[in-house]
Every structure is written in C-alpha cells, then in structure tokens.
Image (spheres, rainbow, N blue to C red):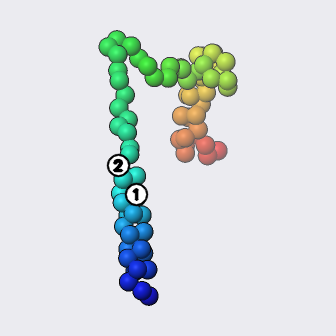
Amino acid sequence: MSARTTRRLNIAVLAAVAALGLAACGESPQVTVYEQGRYQGKADTRPWEGPSFNGDREAWEKALKNRGRNQSEYNRIE
C-alpha cells in the first residue's frame, strides 16, 4: 500500500466518522407546549360507551359484577 492510498483511506475514514458524529447531534427537542386551562390530549370515554355495551351503564355494571363472581374459586366449583 502506498502512502498516498493510506492517506486517502485515512481521510475517508475520518470523514465517515465526522459524518456519523454530526448526524447524532441532529435530534430536535420533543417538548410539548401546554396552554393553561386546555386539555390537548385524546378525550377519554367511559367503559360502558364502547361497542360491546352501546352506552348501557347497567349492563356494564352487571358484567363487571359477574366477572368478579367468576374469579372466586368457591363460586366456580360445583
């Protein structure tokens, strides 16, 4: 390998390292700006407003109670 080829290889490696080093510095800050008194997130829905209960709160409460009862081993064994 000649001195000229070695020098070119060193310059190419140095340029690649510099390019990778500068690419790591390019991240922009991800800060959310909040306005006083305004919620800017996704609106929360109540559990019974989903497609399975169609807004029927009583059916949701009944299903919740039944699920709790089925978690007891004493009630599940006949």
Q: Is residue 71 above or below residue 63?
A: below
Mark 1 vs 2, N-terminal side: 1
Residue located beneath label 2 in the image: 25
Amino acid under label 1?
Ala
Q: Cα distance, mark 1 to mark 2?
A: 10 Å
Q: Is residue 35 left or right of residue 49?
A: left
Most extreme residue toward the front, as rendered? 4
The residue carrying pointer 1 sits among few (fewer than 14), some (14 to 19) or many (20 or more) residues within 10 Å by Cα, namely: few
Q: Nearer the viewer, residue 54 or 41?
A: 41
1 and 2 marks in contact (CB < 8 Å):
no
Q: Residue at x 35, y 32 (%)?
A: 31
Q: Is residue 31 above or below residue 37?
A: below
Q: Nearer the viewer, residue 59 or 15?
A: 15
Q: Which mark is residue 9?
A: none
Element on which disc 1 rests: helix
State which quarter of the image contains the C terminus: top right
Q: Residue at x 53, y 41 (%)?
A: 72
Q: Quadrant of residue 53?
A: top right
Q: Quadrant of residue 74?
A: top right
Q: Nearer the viewer, residue 33 or 61?
A: 33
Q: Is residue 77 above or below residue 4?
A: above
How many callouts does the rendering have?
Answer: 2
Residue located beneath label 1 in the image: 19
Most extreme residue toward the bottom, as rendered? 1
Amino acid under label 2?
Cys
State which quarter of the image contains the N terminus: bottom left
In the rendered image, residue 10, in percent from the top left (x then y), is placed at 38, 74
